[in-house]
Amino acid sequence: MFPNAAGIDYLIGMPGMTHKGLGTEMNRQFTDGVFSAYREIETIVVTPQHANHASCRALENAGYSLAWVGHLHSDDPADAGDAAIYVNHRARVT
């Protein structure tokens, strides 16, 4: 579905560190770093839980677009409920 893609997973677990823009900045810097260091990577894919509005918003603010919402087949209890797939594509130079 996403050839030449990288995936990320993250957690900001300290309550005092949430809702300060840290997730947005972290995602933005990570994305820039991956695209800079790995020329073969065309897309970065992130799969937060759809109900995790803060994470989804941080991704959107960092330039990611919602590509899909639905149920992932997983045995991990943390994956219960609908997941969202967010993508950020490398900018094309023409």
Image (cartoon, helix red, strand yellow):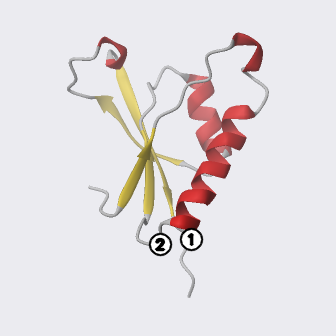
Q: Earlier in the sequence, mark 2 or mark 1?
A: 2
Residue closest to the eye, 29 or 67: 29
Q: Is residue 45 left or right of residue 25?
A: left
Residue 42: x and y, percent? 43, 66
**Picture residue at 64% right of the left edge, 36% below the top:** 58
The residue identified by callout 1 is 91
Amino acid carrying label 2: it is Arg
**Picture residue at 46% right of the left edge, 53% below the top:** 44
**Picture residue at 54% right of the left edge, 66% below the top:** 37
Dot 2, crowdedness within 10 Å: few (<14), some or many (≥20)? few
Quadrant of the image for the N terminus? bottom left
| Residue closest to the far bottom | 94
In 3D space, how far apart are the residues under numbered discs 2 and 1 (Cα atoms)? 11 Å
Location of residue 91 by image quarter: bottom right
The residue identified by callout 2 is 39
Identify the element where label 1 is drawn: loop
Residue 11: x and y, percent? 55, 25
Amino acid carrying label 1: it is Ala
| Residue closest to the far front | 37
Quadrant of the image for the C terminus? bottom right
Q: Is residue 14 left or right of residue 88?
A: right
Dot 1, crowdedness within 10 Å: few (<14), some or many (≥20)? few
